[in-house]
Image: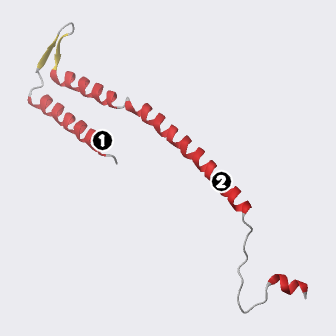
Amino acid sequence: MRLVHWISFLLALFTALLIAVVFVSQPAAQVSIPGLGSLPAYLVLSLVAATAFLAGWVYLPGYALVLSRERRARKKEKQSLEAELKTLRSQQPEELPRIPDRPVPDAAEES
C-alpha cells in the first residue's frame, strides 16, 4: 500500500479517536459557528473530518485518468514492438539446428 494511504488511514484513525475523546470527556461542549449558532463539538469535528476525508478522494479521478493514459501508451508501444518483431522475423530465414553426427536434411532428401 502506498505511503499516502497509510498516512490517510492513520490521520482518520487519530481523528476518530480525538472525536471519541471529546465526546466522552465533555459531551456538552459547544462550538459557536457564525450563522449556524452553537453546535456540539463532536458534531463539528465529525463534519470537518468527513469533509476532509471526502476531499482527499478528489484526486482519484485524476489518478485514474493518468493510469488509463499510461495503459494506452503501453498498449500502443507493445503493438509497435510486435509489428517490428514480425518484420524482423520475416527478413531472416528460420535456421534449423544441425546435429554434427547426422546428415544434413537437404542431402538426405536428394539421395
Q: Amino acid at mark 1?
A: Val
Q: Is residue 101 above or below residue 43?
A: below
Q: Front-most of 10 and 99? A: 99
Q: Nearer the viewer, residue 55 or 81?
A: 81
Q: Which residue is mark 2?
A: 84
5 lies left or right of 39: right
Q: Residue 33 at x, y = what percent?
A: 17, 12
State the count of labels. Answer: 2
Left or right of 14: which side holds 95? right
Q: How is the image coloured?
A: secondary structure
Q: Residues within 10 Å of mark 2 (few under 14, many from 20)?
A: few
Residue identified by numbered label 1? 4
Q: Is residue 6 above or below residue 31?
A: below
Instruction: Select label 2 or label 1 by which is in front.
Output: 2
What residue is rendered at 68% in x and 59% in y?
A: 88
Q: Are the residues flagged by discs 2 and 1 in contact, CB closer than 8 Å? A: no
What kind of element bears circle 2? helix
Instruction: State the residue lying farthest toward the left.
Output: 25
Quadrant containing the C terminus in the rendered view: bottom right
Pick whichever, 43 or 66, lies toward us.
66
Relative image position of residue 26 (x, y in whole percent): 9, 26
